[in-house]
C-alpha cells in the first residue's frame, strides 16, 4: 500500500452500479461492516457509475462524462470505500489518465488518491478482528482481475476469511485466472467467456466448497450464472455479505 491513513471517523461509500442493481444486500453489508467499526458512513445520493464500462470499450468521451458527474460528490479528505476491486481500480488507477489534460484533472487525482477497495480498508486501515458465529463451512475465494492487478488485492480477503474460526478456506488452483466476465467482453465474445467460466466452475467444484466468495459483482454474476446453469451445489456470495452473516451467526 502506498498510503495508509490513520483510522478515520468518517468515510464516503461508493456503492457501484452492479451492487445497486443486482446485489444491494452486499452493498448494505459493506456499510454495516464499516459502521460496526464505529465509522460514520456518507453515501452521496447523486452517485452513479465510475465510467468503467465505457472506458474499457473505448468510449473515452462518454466515460469522462460519467466519471465527471461523480467528482463533486466526494469533497474533502475522507477516504472513499468501494465494495468492488474493479470499480475501485477504475477510480484509483484510470481516472488520472482519463482526466489528463482536462480542467478538473487535479480534482480527479485528489479523489482517486482517496479510493480504497473494501477489504483493503478493513485490513490495512481498520485492522478489523472478526468473531465467527456461523456453522462450519468450506469456502473458496475468487479474486477479480482488476482487484488483483490494479488494486493489489490478493491476501486481504483471504486474511479476513481466515479470521473466521468455523470457516475452512480452500484456495483455487487457478485463482489468478479470469472468470470470463470482463464487462462487455462477455457480450462480445460469449463462446470464449463461457469456456473461461466453465474452467472456473470446475476449479470451484474441485475444492469441495459450498460457497465461492468474491469481491466483485460482475464476476459473481458470471460465476453464479454458470453454477445455476450447471445445477452445481456451490453458491456465490459477495464477501461483505458473507462476513456480515458470519459475525451475526446467520
Image (tube, rainbow, N blue to C red):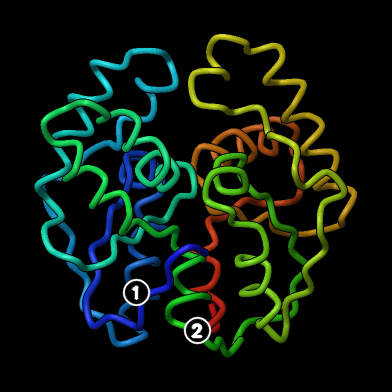
At label 2, counting other C-alpha atoms closer than 10 Å, the crowd grade (few under 14, some 14-19, many 20 or more) is few
List x then y, in percent, for residue 120.
50, 66
List x then y, in percent, for residue 148.
62, 48
Query: In the picture provided, is 203 more to the left or to the right than 102?
Result: right
Q: How many marks?
A: 2
Q: Residue at x 28, y 53 (%)?
A: 14
Q: Residue under label 1, please give it.
A: 32
Dot 1 falls on a residue whose secondary structure is helix
Residue 78 vertical placement versus 109 (above, below): below
| Residue 127's disc number | 2
Distance CA(mark 1)–CA(mark 2): 16 Å
Q: Earlier in the sequence, mark 1 or mark 2?
A: 1
Query: In the picture provided, is 55 more to the left or to the right than 177?
Result: left
Q: Residue at x 21, y 78 (%)?
A: 40
At label 1, counting other C-alpha atoms closer than 10 Å, the crowd grade (few under 14, some 14-19, many 20 or more) is some
Q: Residue at x 39, y 35 (%)?
A: 94
Amino acid at each position: 500500500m502506498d498510503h495508509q491513513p490513520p483510522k478515520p471517523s468518517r468515510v464516503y461509500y461508493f456503492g457501484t452500479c452492479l451492487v445497486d442493481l443486482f446485489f444491494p444486500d452486499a452493498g448494505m453489508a459493506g456499510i454495516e461492516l464499516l459502521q460496526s467499526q464505529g465509522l460514520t458512513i456518507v453515501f452521496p445520493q447523486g452517485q452513479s457509475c465510475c465510467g468503467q464500462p465505457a472506458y474499457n470499450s473505448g468510449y473515452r468521451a462518454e466515460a469522462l462524462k460519467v466519471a465527471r458527474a461523480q467528482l463533486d460528490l466526494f469533497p474533502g479528505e475522507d477516504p472513499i470505500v468501494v465494495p468492488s476491486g474493479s470499480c475501485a481500480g477504475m477510480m484509483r488507477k484510470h481516472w488520472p489518465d482519463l482526466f489528463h489534460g482536462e480542467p478538473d484533472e487535479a480534482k480527479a487525482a485528489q479523489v482517486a488518491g482517496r479510493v480504497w477497495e473494501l477489504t483493503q480498508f478493513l485490513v490495512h486501515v481498520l485492522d478489523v478482528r472478526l468473531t465467527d458465529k456461523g456453522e462450519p463451512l468450506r469456502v473458496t475465494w475468487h479474486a477479480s482481475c482488476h482487484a488483483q492487478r490494479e488494486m493489489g488485492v490478493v491476501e486481504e480477503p483471504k486474511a479476513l476469511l481466515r479470521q473466521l474460526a468455523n470457516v475452512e478456506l480452500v484456495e483455487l488452483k487457478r485463482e489468478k485466472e479470469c472468470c470470463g466476465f470482463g464487462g462487455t467482453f462477455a457480450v462480445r465474445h460469449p463462446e470464449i467467456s463461457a469456456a473461461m467460466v466453465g474452467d472456473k466452475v470446475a476449479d470451484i467444484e474441485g475444492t469441495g466448497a459450498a460457497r465461492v466468495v468474491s469481491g466483485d459483482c460482475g464476476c459473481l454474476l458470471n460465476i453464479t450464472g454458470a453454477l445455476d446453469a450447471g445445477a452445481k451445489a456451490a453458491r456465490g456470495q459477495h464477501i461483505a455479505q458473507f462476513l456480515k452473516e458470519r459475525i451475526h451467526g446467520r
